[in-house]
Image (spheres, grey):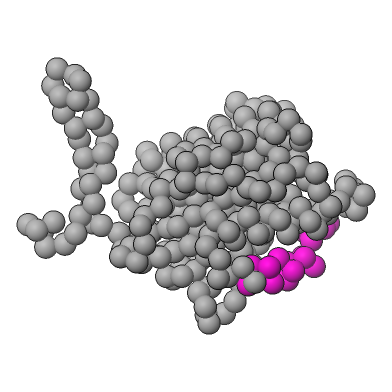
Amino acid sequence: SGVLGSPLAARPIECRPRSRARYCLFELSPDPALTVITGVAKVSGRREGVSGDSFLMRRLAGGRYLMALGDGMGMGVKAAVESSFALSYLHRFLSMGQDLRAAMASLNSLLLLCFPGESFVSLDALVLDLHGGEAQLAKMGSPPTFLQRACGAGGVEVIGDPGPPLGILEDPALVIHRPTLQIGDRIIAITDGVLEGPPSLESPAAAPEREWRKADHPKLADVLLDLGEKDPQEMAEGVLEFAVRRAGGCHDDTTVLVAEIRRRADAVPDAGPPGLGMAAPGRGMRPSRVRPG
C-alpha cells in the first residue's frame, strides 16, 4: 500500500503451511470503498424444517460482492438440493471470471443437463461493485426485489419484470437490471412465500396471472419504511413476521435477505453467512424468531 500510494486488500487464494514448500498465495487488489452489512430471516413451510430456499452472500475477486437467493420447485429436500446446487455453481462461474449474464446462461444449461424433466429454480442474483456502487441484478422467475433508498432519497423502489425460471428453456431471455446503489441504500430480496396469501386464497389456475400480488407491494413497502431505522437483521426478521402474520401461518418456504451499503470506514465489514444457507442458519446470522404455524 505504501509503495503504490493507495490502500490494498489481501485476499488469500491458496495456503499450504504443512506442505514441504510451506507457502501462501494472496491476491492484492485496491481496497474497496464500500462494504455490505447483511441480515437473513427464513422459515420452512414444512414441519420437518427443510427449506427449499437457499441463499449465498460472499465477496468475489476484484472488489465485487454476490448476494443470491434461490427457490427450488416445491418444498422439502428436493427443492433444497436444486436451489443450493444452482447457487453453488453460480458462485463457481462468477469466480472463474464470467460476467453475470454469462454465468446465468451457463447455469441454465447445467440445470437442464443435471435436472431433466419438470424441474426449475427461481433465482435472484445481485453482483455489486464495492468500488463504485454499480450493480447488476439478475431476476429469473423470482418475485420483486425492493430497493430502499437512503433516508430522504425517494423511499422504496420495486424492481420486477423477471425472466422465466432457470432450468426450463434452452435459451431463456435473461433479465439483468442495473441499479446504481449509494451509501445507505438497502436491497431486500424475498422468495414467493413473503407475498403469497393463505392456501384458501391461492388458486393454482390463477397463479400465472396474479403477478406476485401487485396490490401487496405498497403494503410491504410501508413495512420496509417502518423498519428503516432497524439494522438489516432486524429488518429481515420484521419482514418475515409480516409475511407469516399476513398469511396466517407458514404455508410456504419463506426467506428474506437484506443488504445495506455502507462506507467501509463507517462499519466493520460483514462477511455474511459463509457460503450456502439452507435449513440451518449460518455464522453471522441469528435464527429467526418466527416458527412454522
The answer to whether 214 appears left or right of 228 in the picture is right
Image coordinates of residue 17 in percent, x first then y, are: 19, 25
Q: Is residue 218 magenta?
A: yes
Q: Quadrant of residue 111?
A: top right
The answer to whether 62 appears left or right of 144 in the picture is left
Image coordinates of residue 44 in percent, x first then y, are: 71, 40
Give the tally of numbered discs. Answer: 0
Image coordinates of residue 262 in percent, x first then y, are: 40, 65
Query: 218 or 203, which lies in front?
Result: 218
Relative to residue 190, is residue 108 depicted above or below? above
Residue sitting at the far front: 289
Residue sitting at the far bottom: 152
Image coordinates of residue 107 in percent, x first then y, are: 54, 38
Region in magenta: 208-225
The answer to whether residue 59 is seen in the rendering is yes
Query: 29 or 211, which lies in front?
Result: 29
Q: Quadrant of the N terminus?
A: bottom left
Relative to residue 45, is residue 211 depicted above or below? below
Which residue is pictured at 52% across the width and 78% down the height?
A: 151
Query: 65 or 159, which lies in front?
Result: 65
Which residue is pictured at 80% across the width and 58% down the height?
A: 246
Q: Identify the main secondary structure in magenta.
A: helix
The answer to whether 9 appears left or right of 243 in the picture is left
Relative to residue 58, is residue 150 depicted above or below? below
Residue sitting at the far left: 3
Q: Quadrant of residue 129?
A: bottom left
The answer to whether residue 102 is seen in the rendering is no
